[in-house]
Amino acid sequence: MKSLLFFIVSILFLSPISYGQDLLKERIWKISSRKKSIFLDKGVFHSKENPVRQKLTSIRNSYVKSRGYERVVLDFSTAQPPQIYGLISKDSKIFIDLFNTDLGEGISSPNHVKYLKNIDFYPIDSKSLSLELSFDKDVSFDIFYLENPGRLVIDIKK
Protein backbone atom coordinates (compact mmCIF):
# COMPACT_ATOMS: atom_id res chain seq x y z
CA MET A 1 0.00 0.00 0.00
CA LYS A 2 2.84 2.34 0.87
CA SER A 3 4.59 1.76 -2.49
CA LEU A 4 1.30 2.28 -4.38
CA LEU A 5 0.80 5.62 -2.62
CA PHE A 6 4.39 6.59 -3.43
CA PHE A 7 3.83 5.65 -7.09
CA ILE A 8 0.66 7.77 -7.36
CA VAL A 9 2.27 10.79 -5.68
CA SER A 10 5.31 10.47 -7.98
CA ILE A 11 3.11 10.46 -11.07
CA LEU A 12 1.20 13.53 -9.88
CA PHE A 13 4.34 15.57 -9.26
CA LEU A 14 6.51 14.37 -12.14
CA SER A 15 3.99 14.26 -14.99
CA PRO A 16 4.03 18.06 -15.66
CA ILE A 17 7.80 17.86 -16.08
CA SER A 18 7.46 15.38 -18.93
CA TYR A 19 5.52 17.91 -21.04
CA GLY A 20 8.26 20.56 -21.01
CA GLN A 21 10.78 20.97 -23.82
CA ASP A 22 13.95 18.98 -23.22
CA LEU A 23 16.75 20.83 -25.00
CA LEU A 24 19.20 18.10 -24.04
CA LYS A 25 17.51 15.83 -26.59
CA GLU A 26 17.72 18.49 -29.32
CA ARG A 27 20.64 18.67 -31.70
CA ILE A 28 22.47 21.95 -30.99
CA TRP A 29 24.94 23.29 -33.52
CA LYS A 30 26.86 26.43 -34.34
CA ILE A 31 26.11 27.58 -37.85
CA SER A 32 29.13 28.13 -40.07
CA SER A 33 30.11 30.47 -42.86
CA ARG A 34 29.83 27.82 -45.58
CA LYS A 35 27.19 25.50 -46.96
CA LYS A 36 27.50 21.96 -45.62
CA SER A 37 24.58 20.33 -47.50
CA ILE A 38 23.49 18.63 -44.28
CA PHE A 39 19.72 19.09 -44.04
CA LEU A 40 18.15 18.80 -40.58
CA ASP A 41 14.49 18.70 -39.56
CA LYS A 42 14.84 19.64 -35.89
CA GLY A 43 17.29 21.20 -33.50
CA VAL A 44 18.69 24.40 -32.05
CA PHE A 45 21.25 26.54 -33.85
CA HIS A 46 23.28 29.64 -32.99
CA SER A 47 26.03 31.85 -34.38
CA LYS A 48 28.95 33.79 -32.98
CA GLU A 49 28.38 37.01 -31.07
CA ASN A 50 28.28 40.27 -32.99
CA PRO A 51 27.74 43.39 -30.82
CA VAL A 52 27.38 45.74 -33.84
CA ARG A 53 23.92 47.30 -34.17
CA GLN A 54 22.33 46.62 -37.57
CA LYS A 55 19.15 46.31 -39.62
CA LEU A 56 17.47 43.51 -41.47
CA THR A 57 17.38 45.19 -44.90
CA SER A 58 15.63 42.61 -47.09
CA ILE A 59 14.42 39.03 -47.39
CA ARG A 60 14.68 37.11 -50.65
CA ASN A 61 13.61 33.62 -51.65
CA SER A 62 13.91 31.55 -54.79
CA TYR A 63 13.47 28.01 -56.06
CA VAL A 64 15.47 26.42 -58.88
CA LYS A 65 14.25 22.93 -59.75
CA SER A 66 17.73 21.70 -60.77
CA ARG A 67 19.10 22.53 -57.28
CA GLY A 68 16.17 20.77 -55.62
CA TYR A 69 15.77 23.24 -52.76
CA GLU A 70 14.28 26.63 -52.02
CA ARG A 71 16.64 29.31 -50.69
CA VAL A 72 15.63 32.05 -48.27
CA VAL A 73 18.20 34.83 -47.68
CA LEU A 74 18.04 37.45 -44.92
CA ASP A 75 20.19 40.47 -45.81
CA PHE A 76 21.73 42.68 -43.10
CA SER A 77 23.18 46.19 -43.15
CA THR A 78 26.69 45.26 -41.95
CA ALA A 79 29.53 43.03 -43.16
CA GLN A 80 28.71 40.28 -40.66
CA PRO A 81 25.30 38.92 -39.65
CA PRO A 82 24.04 39.52 -36.10
CA GLN A 83 24.21 37.04 -33.27
CA ILE A 84 21.53 34.43 -34.04
CA TYR A 85 19.65 31.86 -31.98
CA GLY A 86 17.11 29.62 -33.65
CA LEU A 87 14.93 26.57 -33.25
CA ILE A 88 13.68 24.22 -35.94
CA SER A 89 10.42 22.88 -34.53
CA LYS A 90 8.68 19.62 -35.37
CA ASP A 91 5.70 21.46 -36.88
CA SER A 92 7.72 22.78 -39.87
CA LYS A 93 8.52 26.18 -38.38
CA ILE A 94 11.76 27.97 -37.66
CA PHE A 95 11.95 30.50 -34.83
CA ILE A 96 14.88 32.92 -35.12
CA ASP A 97 16.10 35.59 -32.67
CA LEU A 98 18.36 38.28 -34.18
CA PHE A 99 20.23 40.26 -31.52
CA ASN A 100 21.13 43.97 -31.91
CA THR A 101 18.93 44.05 -35.01
CA ASP A 102 16.15 46.38 -36.12
CA LEU A 103 13.54 45.64 -38.77
CA GLY A 104 14.23 47.73 -41.86
CA GLU A 105 11.52 49.82 -43.43
CA GLY A 106 9.29 48.27 -46.07
CA ILE A 107 10.21 44.65 -45.36
CA SER A 108 7.40 42.18 -45.76
CA SER A 109 7.05 38.43 -45.93
CA PRO A 110 8.28 37.16 -49.32
CA ASN A 111 5.92 35.46 -51.74
CA HIS A 112 5.23 31.75 -51.42
CA VAL A 113 7.58 30.18 -53.99
CA LYS A 114 7.84 26.48 -53.11
CA TYR A 115 8.02 25.51 -49.41
CA LEU A 116 7.99 28.83 -47.52
CA LYS A 117 4.45 29.86 -46.54
CA ASN A 118 5.13 33.10 -44.67
CA ILE A 119 7.33 35.00 -42.24
CA ASP A 120 6.02 36.81 -39.18
CA PHE A 121 8.09 39.56 -37.53
CA TYR A 122 8.12 40.25 -33.78
CA PRO A 123 10.23 43.23 -32.61
CA ILE A 124 10.58 42.05 -28.99
CA ASP A 125 12.40 45.09 -27.64
CA SER A 126 14.88 47.70 -28.83
CA LYS A 127 17.70 45.15 -28.83
CA SER A 128 16.27 42.13 -30.66
CA LEU A 129 14.01 40.98 -33.46
CA SER A 130 12.27 37.61 -33.63
CA LEU A 131 11.03 35.89 -36.77
CA GLU A 132 8.73 32.92 -37.25
CA LEU A 133 9.09 31.18 -40.61
CA SER A 134 6.31 28.74 -41.56
CA PHE A 135 6.84 26.00 -44.15
CA ASP A 136 4.96 23.18 -45.83
CA LYS A 137 5.08 19.89 -43.95
CA ASP A 138 8.00 17.47 -44.01
CA VAL A 139 10.85 19.77 -45.00
CA SER A 140 14.44 19.90 -43.78
CA PHE A 141 16.93 22.76 -43.58
CA ASP A 142 20.58 23.63 -44.20
CA ILE A 143 21.37 26.90 -42.41
CA PHE A 144 24.56 28.95 -42.75
CA TYR A 145 25.69 32.58 -42.94
CA LEU A 146 27.73 34.62 -45.40
CA GLU A 147 29.79 37.77 -44.86
CA ASN A 148 30.49 40.97 -46.82
CA PRO A 149 27.59 41.76 -46.77
CA GLY A 150 26.12 39.85 -43.83
CA ARG A 151 23.45 37.29 -44.78
CA LEU A 152 21.67 34.36 -43.18
CA VAL A 153 20.90 31.62 -45.71
CA ILE A 154 18.27 28.90 -45.21
CA ASP A 155 18.04 26.14 -47.81
CA ILE A 156 14.81 24.10 -47.65
CA LYS A 157 14.07 20.75 -49.28
CA LYS A 158 11.58 17.89 -48.96
Image: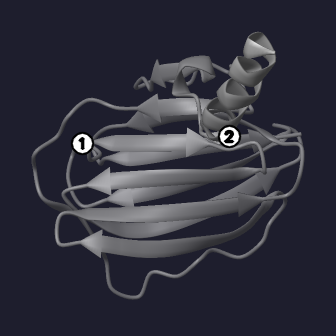
Which label number is shown at residue 121?
none
Q: Which residue is drawn at the image coordinates 54% and 19% (left, top)?
A: 24
The first of marks 2 and 1 along the sequence is 2
Residue 140 shown left or right of residue 83 in the figure: right
Q: Is residue 118 visible?
A: yes
Q: Nearer the viewer, residue 93 or 10?
A: 10
Indicate the position of residue 86 as horizontal and vertical percent values. Answer: 48, 43
Q: Which residue is mark 1?
A: 80
- Check the picture and name the quadrant holding the C terminus: top right
Can you see residue 40? no
Between tags 2 and 1, which lies in front? Answer: 2
- Please indicate whether residue 128 sits to the left or right of residue 88 in the image: left
Q: Residue at x 47, y 52 (%)?
A: 96
Q: Name the image quarter holding the N terminus.
A: top right
Q: Amino acid at mark 2?
A: Tyr
In the rendered image, the residue lying farthest to the bottom is 106
Q: Which residue is mark 2?
A: 19
